[in-house]
Amino acid sequence: MLQQTLVLIKPDGLKKSLTGNVLTRLSETKLDIVATKIVKVSRELAAEHYKELKDKPFFEDLLKYLMGEYHKKKVMALVYWGEDAIEKVRKICGATNPEEADAVSIRGAYGRITTKGVYENVIHASANMAEAEREIKLWFQPGEIIQDFYPVKAVKGTCEKKVWA
Ligand code: IDP
Ligand code: MG
């Protein structure tokens, strides 16, 4: 089944210069990259992204981790698209807990658990189609993706925006 999935290279991945390694591993899937950008993550974006985990004891640390407070204040966001994209990407990422992840998966090879108990696992990938839709719409605007997965509507632009001077 053709699917799209959101991938985030988290701040530990960027701080440790793992971007190239992670993208090389993901290229094994032969999926297409249809959107990408570097994002400085606000608290609001981090909290919305991880809203299902808001009652977990590690939630506050997780927000700080995604905002880059322990590493660099940036995340690389990508949308991958292709046959069974969700499962293929999740498999290469490995288990959530980097100590339990397969040693040759991205999280197994590059992740760690900090002494504070944060799972610094380098990468995020959507777990299912509903999550992918919610997350892609949260991180990207329609014009930033070169494929039309979801319906769009035109609105008259009245708000101010920055253009090149
Ligand atoms: P996933 O990233 O494999 O989908 P989720 O359960 O959705 O796993 O958790 C989101 C993120 O929260 C994980 O990637 C990890 O960074 C962090 N996390 C999950 N469970 C724990 C935990 O038990 N302790 C510390 N951090 C955790
Ligand atoms: Mg998850």
Image (spheres, rainbow, N blue to C red):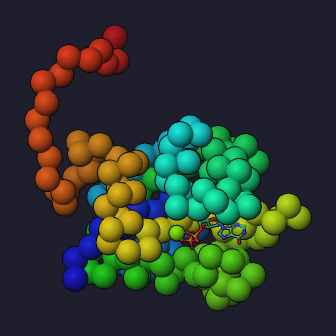
x, y percentage for residue 12? Answer: 69, 56
Residue 127 visible in the shown view: yes
**In the figure, residue 93 lies in which quadrant?**
bottom right
Pick out the residue farthest to the right. Answer: 115
Residue 155 % position (x, y): 13, 30
Whether 153 is drawn above or below 5: the answer is above
8 left or right, relative to 152: right
Which of the 4 image quadrants contains residue 116? bottom right
Residue for point 40% across, 82% down: 87
Kindly indicate the quadrant of the structure image that contains residue 34.
bottom left
In the image, residue 154 sits, relative to residue 91, either above or below, namely above
For this view, does 71 lie left or right of residue 165?
right
Residue lying at 22% horizontally and 82% vertically, measured from the top left: 1
Does residue 12 show up?
no
From this viewpoint, which residue is outermost toward the top? 165
Q: In the visual, does 142 lie left or right of 109?
A: left
Rendering coords of residue 154 (x, y %): 11, 35
The percent coordinates of residue 126 (x first, y second) are 43, 68
Quadrant position of the C terminus in the picture: top left
Q: Which residue is the extreme one toward the front?
A: 55
Q: Residue at x 29, y 43 (%)?
A: 141
